[in-house]
Image (tube, helix red, strand yellow):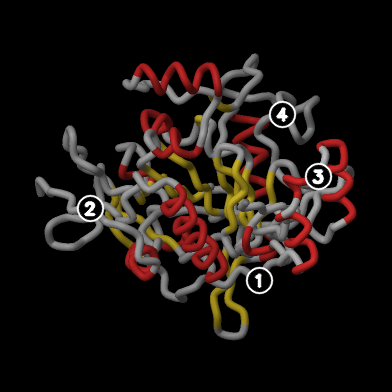
């Protein structure tokens, strides 16, 4: 008889049952049924106790109801201080700010991912809800944005309260990952790519057509560039030093626009790497690579999509929207792709038309 009854929710946090308990459990089949529950409770470093808090260590994200570890600090919409995109009312100043684009809109997300071509899958999801296995058949893209707000608190205010939009994850200057919706939901972050994608908004003021504009929210401290505290006062990034991971001012072409931008923080890169690895392992249809030209350069235009072929799964907003330029020319695509490669994630050969 194979019996497991330890009370922790994951193998990593589950204490071993002692030998006495194992002996008792192996003989449960000999006990009358009315003694079963009592025996389990009495033997119990391993029994679940009604009313006890279920354990969490604070690094979990939620995919179709499953709690999955990332190894980085995560605050869920369920947590105090989290950002809840499920709530129908505005979070900040409800008497002042209303969703600009859809003022009468209640929800900021869709509960069904549209365009499902498998009728069995569509019927199953409609009547039973998403499982992680079903979701893995649909999601093949993670879209990376900068939020143009400089902090996750300001980003959520703009998305939820003003614009009536959403993103699954917000990544703050100090590396904290905020999850606002279960990944199963259709967040509104990338237009036509929403049905197949997960959205991540990284706190950053953005990329600009001049170097002077790109440095508007930065200052020099002890010979190093850092985020200007005055630009994030009163936000979730207020107490974070905000030093770019790489000090130079970056510039580059995206959709024909020449742009300047400061880098993201080291904490943001580390958390993003962990989050991407977690998502790619959990939803293996996401190809753990970025869109590149045959020369090896990251594409500065739209991602190529060939019918029946897998697509590069880690993209910027500009790869799925010709009017977008985020996450900007400073974003370190090589670093991200190297981290994904080091995680030994499966990769499929992708044919290029370039």
Residue 11 falls in image quadrant: bottom right
- Who comes first in sequence, dot 2 or dot 4? 4
Q: Name the residue under label 4.
A: 87
Give the spatial CA distance, label 3 vs label 1.
62 Å
Determine the secondary structure under disc 4: loop
Q: Name the residue under label 3.
A: 31
- Who comes first in sequence, dot 4 or dot 3? 3
Q: Residue at x 41, y 39 (%)?
A: 136
> Whole-percent x and y of residue 154?
66, 46
Q: Nearer the viewer, residue 195 or 235?
A: 195
Give the spatial CA distance, label 4 vs label 3.
48 Å
- Who comes first in sequence, dot 1 or dot 4? 4
Q: Please, which residue is most extreme toward the front here?
A: 30
- Who comes first in sequence, dot 2 or dot 1? 1
- Nearest to viewer (mark 2 / mark 1): 2
Residue 52 in sight in this render: no
């Amino acid at each position: 008889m194979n019996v497991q009854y330890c009370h922790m929710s994951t193998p990593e946090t589950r204490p071993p049952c002692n030998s006495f308990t194992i002996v008792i459990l192996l003989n449960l089949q000999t006990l009358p049924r009315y003694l079963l529950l009592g025996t389990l409770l009495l033997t119990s470093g391993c029994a679940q106790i009604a009313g006890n808090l279920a354990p969490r260590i604070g690094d979990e994200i939620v995919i179709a109801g499953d709690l999955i570890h990332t190894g980085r600090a995560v605050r869920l919409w369920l947590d105090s201080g989290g950002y809840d995109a499920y709530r129908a009312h505005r979070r900040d100043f409800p008497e002042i700010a209303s969703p600009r684009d859809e003022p009468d809109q209640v929800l900021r997300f869709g509960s069904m991912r549209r365009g499902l071509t498998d009728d069995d899958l569509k019927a199953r999801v409609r009547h039973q809800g998403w499982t992680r296995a079903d979701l893995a058949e649909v999601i093949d893209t993670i879209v990376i944005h900068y939020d143009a707000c400089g902090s996750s608190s300001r980003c959520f205010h703009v998305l939820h309260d003003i614009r009536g939009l959403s993103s699954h994850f917000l990544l703050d200057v100090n590396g904290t990952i905020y999850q606002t919706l279960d990944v199963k939901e259709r967040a509104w972050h990338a237009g036509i790519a929403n049905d197949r994608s997960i959205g991540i908004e990284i706190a950053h003021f953005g990329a600009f057509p001049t170097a002077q504009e790109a440095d508007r929210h930065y200052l020099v401290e002890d010979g190093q560039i850092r985020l200007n505290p005055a630009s994030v006062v009163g936000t979730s990034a207020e107490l974070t030093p905000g030093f770019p991971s790489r000090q130079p001012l970056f510039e580059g072409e995206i959709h024909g626009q020449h742009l300047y931008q400061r880098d993201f923080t080291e904490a943001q890169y580390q958390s993003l790497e962990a989050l991407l690895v977690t998502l790619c392992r959990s939803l293996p249809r996401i190809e753990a690579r970025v869109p590149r030209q045959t020369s090896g350069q990251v594409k500065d235009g739209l991602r190529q999509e060939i019918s029946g072929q897998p697509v590069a799964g880690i993209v910027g907003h500009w790869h799925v929207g010709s009017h977008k330029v985020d996450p900007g020319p400073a974003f370190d695509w090589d670093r991200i792709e190297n981290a994904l490669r080091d995680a030994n994630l499966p990769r499929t050969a992708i044919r290029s038309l370039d």
